Amino acid sequence: MYNYSLHQHINQSLLKMELDITGKDNLFYTRFMANASALRSLYTDLYGSHQKAEEVFNALINTISQAYINRPDALQKADLIKQQNGIWFLSNDITGMSLYVDRFCGNLANMPAKLDYFKELGVNFLHLMPIFESPQGESDGGYAVSNFRKVDDRFGTLEDLQTLKAKMSAEQMYLMVDIVLNHTSYRHEWAEKAKGGDKNYQDYFYMFDDRSLPDAYEKAMPEIFPEAAPGSFTYVPECNKWVMTVFHNYQWDLNYKNPVVFNAMLDNILFYANLGIDILRIDAPAFIWKEVGTSCQNLPQAHTLLQLIKQCVQIAAPGMALLGEAIVAPKEILKYFGTGLATAKECDFAYNATQMAVQWDALATGDVRVLMAAQEEVLKKPYGTSWITYTRCHDDIGLGYEDYMISDAGFNPYEHRKFLKEYYGGTHPVSPATGALFSVNPKTQDARISGSLASLCGLEKALAANHETAINTAVQKILLMQAVSFFLGGVPMLFYGDELGYTNDYSYLEDPGKSYDNRWMHRPVIDWNKNDQIHIEGSIEQRIFTATQQLIKLRKQLPMIADNKNIHWLNIYNIHVAGYIRALNEKKLFCLYNFSNRASYLTWYALKEHGIPPTVLFDHWSKTTYTVGRDDEYFILAPYSFYLLEQM
Ligand code: GLC
């Protein structure tokens, strides 16, 4: 909407910064004007009544403009190219991998030499787990940042990162890093100043003189790490105050009610944008706004704040997409794409955490009904946004999907979750999985699951028993899990090591900085001798790597896999098999997944209810052609198998 005084004000600010708004900076100027009203209104919603509101709003205009001024020409060109290609990140061309640089190959300087490995696999998008400075031993895998602009010495230098980025750009690879938005390390300069008694900096955090407000907050706040870090506040002896620490006691929650904090963190976000980051992972966005008496998660103001960030990024660095890492209840995840007038104007990506969890559910039970019950929510994702699809990541697997999804499938939610925890936690007598329970809350019995893809699929036990059939089954399960998420729509994100079947690594138990957190069991240290096995015909590593490579290749070849909101789940008339159609124009791909340890029988009729019935189907996975049979004949799916059937 046109707003004379706001637009004049921005005009004047840009002119003062000597921007050529009718010439070379016109595109930036246009973006600013197009977004100005939304920007102002979101800002006013959050900060309108703050005494520093106007002062910080002016500072914000400068932060955005300065970031644009600093944006290298090459990135501005890349921004343009991305925008000219529709919505670049919906493409079926992108496949990612998430990795810890030090555990993968030592440091950033060694990364360029590894680009060939990614190329061989087909991965063209890297998520580098946190690499900015973080105190060793109190780092939460880098998610406790003490300096947002300095690469930690353990990983190398900012220059190393820039060199890597340049090499990746030359290879048309995309890059993602995190902005740890919710908190800083207790060793961050702001926290140090707060400890020293500086009131301005104490206001950067939620700090209180006594326990009365912390007690009131804690009444309604669930604990995130109840074993390793119970409670949500920590006493700070240096200044005799209590500070909010939702995660570990060394991670201090930033106070976004203070607009100065917002502006400072936006500056960091735009600093990352100008490093050439293609997708920025916003860590833990569900937690960024707190109100006493609430769970302090998923609050409406958190969404307003993310929308505000989106507006600012779109003005200064339109080529950078945002991923909101909201691992919350299915209904809540969807809201991170924006709602109402802000639909598709908040995060561009979210993790498809619901899908990930229900896949593990289906694998344990051999029954896809919970997975199917969850789809109604998952399908609400608006066009123009996308998922990061995954089976494993550096974190635990939460079973946070809704109870009704379990009871709709005919199970008792409490008993069902108990079974899953035992199945994957390693205590179920017949489970082939090796995992562990993470963050068990004795008060609520809640628990999440740690373990690598391969170990949870049974490879660790099968190898220990040297049991060939069990090994083959585990490999089948690994590929089944990957395949479901590779063809769903969205960008698949592999977790490093899973591409060749790394099992759990228990060495973390010997490191006091890690032993309290069993998520480290599935964060392997790569042994390049083992990785070399990918070239040894018949080795487990080769079998998993080659198959994963093949899945990635198929994704790229099949245009209907791009995330155009073109997924349709099938009613398959068999509780062991999940299936969906991905259609584009005349092209139709039936993707079928058998979660059972036995063969499943599907009547051909199940594939005939969707437009023109197929007569011939070509399976891209096994390269087999099938003639579609009569309605009362069966298509037989082998145990833990999948089919990517194109209608010919
Ligand atoms: C995110 C990260 C997780 C970390 C937490 C706190 O959930 O994925 O690893 O512990 O944020 O920063």
Image: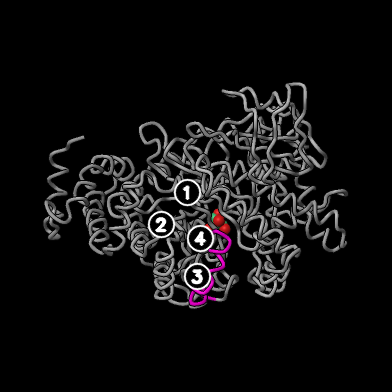
Q: Are marks 1 and 2 in contact (CB under 8 Å)?
A: no
Q: Residue at x 76, y 44 (%)?
A: 640
Question: Quarter-wise, where is residue 503 in the image?
Answer: bottom right
The prevailing secondary structure element of the residues shown in magenta is: helix
Disc 2 crowd, CA 10 A, few/some/many (<14, 14-19, 20+): many
> Mark 3 = which residue?
134
Q: Quadrant of ligand 1?
A: bottom right
Residue 278: mark in rendering? 2
- Amino acid marked by disc 2: Asp
Horizontally, residue 515 falls left or right of residue 170, namely: right
Q: Mark 2 or mark 1, which is nearer the start of the sequence? A: 2
Q: Mark 3 or mark 1, which is nearer the start of the sequence? A: 3
**Over which residues does the magenta segment extend?**
107-127
Quarter of the picture containing the N terminus is: top left
Q: Mark 3 or mark 2, which is nearer the start of the sequence? A: 3
In the structure shown, which secondary structural element does the residue marked by tag 2 occupy?
Answer: loop
In the structure shown, which secondary structural element does the residue marked by tag 3 occupy?
Answer: loop
Horizontally, residue 11 falls left or right of residue 307, namely: left
Q: Mark 2 or mark 4, which is nearer the start of the sequence? A: 4
Q: Residue at x 42, y 61 (%)?
A: 172
- Amino acid marked by disc 4: His
Find residue 90 and report its horizontal and vertical position in percent.
45, 45
Which is more foreground, mark 1 or mark 3? 1
Residue 127: mark in rendering? 4
Let me know if residue 123 is in the magenta part. Answer: yes
Which is more foreground, mark 3 or mark 4? 4
